[in-house]
Image (cartoon, coloured by chain):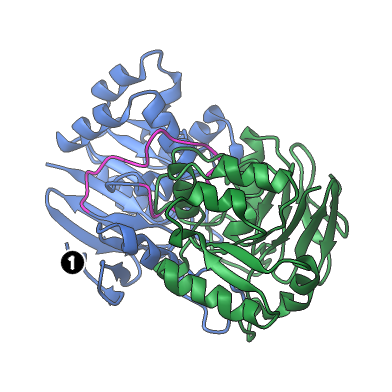
Chain colours: A blue, B green
Amino acid sequence: MRKLLLASTSTLFGQSYLEYLLKELQSFFIGVNVITFIPYARPGGISHDDYTTMAATAFSKIDKKVIGLHTYKDPIKAISEAEAFYTGGGNTFLLVQQLHELQLLEPLRNKIEAGTPYFGTSAGSNIAGPSMKTTNDMPIAYPPSFDTLGVVNFNLNPHYLDPNPNSTHKGETRETRIREFHVFNSTPVIGLREGDYILVHGNRNSLKGKGSARIFEAGKTPYESQVIPF
Amino acid sequence: MRKLLLASTSTLFGQSYLEYLLKELQSFFIGVNVITFIPYARPGGISHDDYTTMAATAFSKIDKKVIGLHTYKDPIKAISEAEAFYTGGGNTFLLVQQLHELQLLEPLRNKIEAGTPYFGTSAGSNIAGPSMKTTNDMPIAYPPSFDTLGVVNFNLNPHYLDPNPNSTHKGETRETRIREFHVFNSTPVIGLREGDYILVHGNRNSLKGKGSARIFEAGKTPYESQVIPF
């Protein structure tokens, strides 16, 4: 039975890394000793080692050990033997390029489908959907495809921001960008605000956190929802 | 001699389409009768025809005729015979996908190098640099490459926004994103604020508009400049 926790952000303003999620993570990772950390998104260009240390420091507070996937000689084997996964945020293009290049998407998908717990934040949540086409990130690296895990049947837009009615800036709003996505694509999109996350147990998707999410479906007006409608 | 006008945005808040640029465009397109419009970026999913009408309406105010490139049976031939170009903003991924698919990048590059005036706004300015890797847009379409015209030796970040020191949002700032770009790429980047534009005459690049631009070079602290330093 699939078990995922997909968060909009790793960190809330004024808090430490993963702080607001620790209680939830304790029950999500119950029975797990070692979490395999996927560090490829490298926020701000941080090294794989430093990023893994960041994750390990946070998880040590709930007595979980973290090992970076980049430290294994054979990452495909490491994935097949992992107890649980955490993919951190950063640049989605870089993350997806690495996962394709190292041929890790299929092994990871298989393990998640077989019930291995998967936790993602930001870019790490983005890749759970069928494609990375609703990321906010800058295309600093060219992945061989925008296809991602497809272990949930919706795309995420993490760090979702509502249009600011007082803005005089003429760059596209997040809503405009997602609606442009739907001119050419039919996958529904969840605009997930910071502080909110989705818990997936089998085919049940629950919205948790502070409130409602913004739901975008092709051909429909975007709407607020306190549940995940698909 | 190359002749380009690369603008951050087509429209300023509270103004009509291209209004703030019309005077400059009048002298930029002096002697030109017909402008070939490249509508593929389709802002908000607008049709090629409707987008061309928008551009034609604005250019009629300075007595220029506009013809959409999509109306030609042979767009490569249309490019080779064009008097001048305007590429409108919208989604850079879609624009670049179309230009690659229709094999228009090389003919367009050759014409610009030969001195045919090229005007771009937003996505249309983005593609003048070596790559589209510093666009703000959402990857709603998958282009066969991120390479673009390379008729200037810098990348642009249009609609540049300064980091907001009072923000509690944890999504990456524009500065963070561009600095991530420089972890993996060495092309300098100009953060071009709305209202500003770059005039290229041969090898001379002038910054015009309201003020200074934010300059990002690999390995350097970003800085303000009232001239284009490369």
Q: Nearer the viewer, residue B114 or B189?
A: B114
In the rendered image, residue B63, in percent from the top left (x then y), is placed at 68, 79
Residue B157, compared with residue A210, is above or below; it is: above
Q: Image quadrant of residue B19?
A: bottom right
Q: Nearer the viewer, residue B172 or B140?
A: B140
Q: Can residue A171 be seen at all in this image of the molecule?
A: no
Residue A87, compared with residue B40, is above or below; it is: above
Left or right: where A58 falls relative to A32: right
- Residue ID for mark 1: A229
Residue A142, compared with residue B49, is above or below; it is: above
Task: Please name the amino acid that badge 1 sits on.
Answer: Pro
Q: Can residue A192 be seen at all in this image of the molecule?
A: yes
Which residue is located at x 83 percent, y 60 percent?
B207
Name the outermost residue toward the top: A73
Main SS, magenta residues: loop
Q: Nearer the viewer, residue B167 or A60?
A: B167
**Over which residues does the magenta segment extend?**
A132-153
